[in-house]
Image: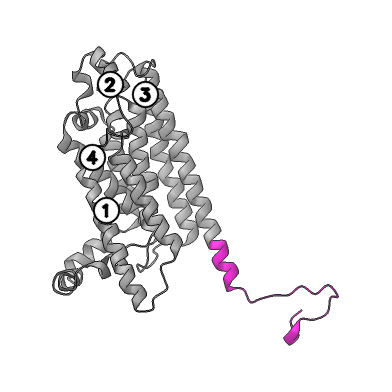
C-alpha cells in the first residue's frame, strides 16, 4: 500500500486516473487464509460426499465461494489501490470484508469440510490432538462468547479508525495487513453467534441473535456520525487537494454515510430479517401437515 499523502497533487491525479481494472491488482497475504481454506473445504467435501454425506447443500458451497470472491475484491482488486487516495473507497474495502465476506464464509459452514480436507497425517497427528487440549477448548469457548465477539468487533473498528492507527496503516504494508487481519478476526467472532456455523452449538436463541445484531449498530452509528459530521479531515487524506473533483472533507463525509447507512445499517437489517425468516421456516417445518377442507368436514384421523 503506497503512502498517498507523500505524493504531490499532480502525481496523485496521475496515479488515480491511471488505475487499471485489469492490471492494478495487489497481493495481500491475508487472502491466503480464505483461499487455502476454500481449497481444503472442497477437498474435504469431496471425501464427505464419497462416504454418502449430504449435509452441505449447494447454497452453502455457493455462499463460501461468494465470500471468497468478495474477499478477493476487497483485498486484491483496484479497490485496495483506490483506498490509498480515498476514504470512501477505504470504507468500502473494510465493509466488504467485515459485513459481507466474513458472514458469507461462515454461512458456508466451513469447519468440518476444512478438517476433512487436511492431509490425513496432519489431521490425525496434529489437528485432532491439538483441538482436544484443554487450553484450545477453553480459548475457543471464551472467544466465541457473544460479549467477547461484540467487543472484539467494536474494538477493532474503533481502534483502526483512530487517526494514529489509520494513518499508520496507510504508511506501512505490515500495519495494513495487521489491520485487515484484525478486521477479519473481529468480524468472525461477532458473526459467529449470529450464524452459529455447524457443528458448534448455538449460544443464543433467535431473538437474542437479532438483539445482538441491533446492539452492534450502536457503536457503528456513533463512529459513523463522528466521521460524517466532523468539521475537519480526520486522516492524512487532508494533505491531498481532492479526489476526482471532490474535496477531501466532502469525500470523508461520503465515506461516513457509506459506513453508517449504505452498508452498516442495511447489512444489519438484512441479517436480522434473515434470522427471523430462517426461524419462521424452521418452526413451520416442525408443524404437522394440515389440510383445509372446503366442506368443513374433519381431516383424516379425526383432525379438524
Q: Earlier in the sequence, mark 4 or mark 2?
A: 4
* Observer-nearest of 8 and 25: 25
Compared with 86, 212 (above or below) is below
Of tags 2 and 1, the one toward the viewer is: 1
The reply to whether callout 2 and callout 1 are in contact (CB within 8 Å) is no
Side of 172 relative to 267 (left or right) = left
* Observer-nearest of 278 and 56: 56
Task: Residue 179: give its label.
Answer: 4
Disc 1 designates what residue?
A: 35
Q: Is residue 195 visible?
A: no
Residue at position x 32%, y 52% in the image: 188
Q: Which residues are magenta?
A: 279-304
Total marks shown come to 4
Residue at position x 16%, y 73% in the image: 129
The reply to whether callout 3 and callout 2 are in contact (CB within 8 Å) is yes
Q: How is the image coloured?
A: one colour
Q: Earlier in the sequence, mark 2 or mark 1?
A: 1
Compared with 18, 1 (above or below) is below
Q: Secondary structure at mark 3?
A: helix
Residue at position x 15%, y 38% in the image: 174
Disc 3 designates what residue?
A: 252
Q: Secondary structure at mark 2?
A: helix
- What's the CA distance linking mark 3 and mark 1? 32 Å
The reply to whether callout 3 and callout 1 are in contact (CB within 8 Å) is no
Disc 2 designates what residue?
A: 237
Q: Earlier in the sequence, mark 4 or mark 3?
A: 4
Of tags 3 and 1, the one toward the viewer is: 1
Q: Secondary structure at mark 1?
A: helix
Q: Is residue 2 visible?
A: yes
Q: Residues within 10 Å of mark 3 (few under 14, many from 20)?
A: many
Amino acid at each position: 500500500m503506497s503512502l498517498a499523502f507523500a505524493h504531490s497533487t499532480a502525481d496523485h491525479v496521475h496515479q488515480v486516473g491511471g488505475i487499471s481494472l485489469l492490471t492494478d491488482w495487489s497481493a495481500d497475504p491475508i487472502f491466503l487464509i480464505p483461499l487455502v481454506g476454500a481449497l481444503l473445504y472442497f477437498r474435504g467435501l469431496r471425501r464427505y460426499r464419497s462416504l454418502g454425506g449430504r449435509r452441505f447443500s449447494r447454497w452453502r458451497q455457493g455462499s463460501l465461494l461468494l465470500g471468497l470472491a468478495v474477499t478477493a475484491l476487497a483485498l486484491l482488486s483496484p479497490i485496495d489501490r483506490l483506498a490509498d487516495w480515498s476514504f470512501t473507497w477505504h470504507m468500502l474495502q473494510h465493509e466488504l470484508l467485515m459485513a459481507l465476506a466474513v458472514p458469507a464464509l461462515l454461512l458456508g459452514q466451513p469447519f468440518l469440510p476444512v478438517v476433512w480436507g487436511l492431509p490425513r497425517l496432519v489431521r490425525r497427528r496434529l489437528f485432532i490432538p491439538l483441538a482436544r487440549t484443554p487450553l484450545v477448548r477453553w480459548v475457543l469457548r471464551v472467544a466465541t462468547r457473544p460479549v467477547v465477539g461484540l467487543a472484539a468487533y467494536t474494538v477493532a473498528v474503533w481502534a483502526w479508525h483512530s487517526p494514529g492507527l489509520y494513518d499508520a496503516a496507510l504508511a506501512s504494508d505490515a500495519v495494513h495487513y495487521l489491520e485487515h487481519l484484525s478486521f477479519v478476526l473481529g468480524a468472525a467472532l461477532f458473526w459467529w453467534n449470529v450464524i452459529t456455523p455447524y457443528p458448534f452449538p448455538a449460544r443464543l436463541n433467535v431473538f437474542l441473535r437479532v438483539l445482538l445484531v441491533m446492539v452492534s449498530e450502536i457503536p457503528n452509528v456513533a463512529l459513523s456520525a463522528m466521521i460524517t459530521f466532523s468539521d475537519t479531515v480526520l486522516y492524512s487524506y487532508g494533505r491531498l487537494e481532492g479526489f476526482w473533483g471532490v474535496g477531501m472533507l466532502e469525500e470523508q463525509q461520503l465515506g461516513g454515510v457509506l459506513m453508517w447507512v449504505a452498508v452498516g445499517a442495511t447489512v444489519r437489517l438484512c441479517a436480522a430479517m434473515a434470522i427471523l425468516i430462517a426461524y419462521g421456516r424452521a418452526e413451520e417445518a416442525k408443524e404437522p401437515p394440515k389440510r383445509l377442507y372446503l366442506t368443513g368436514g374433519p381431516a383424516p384421523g379425526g383432525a379438524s
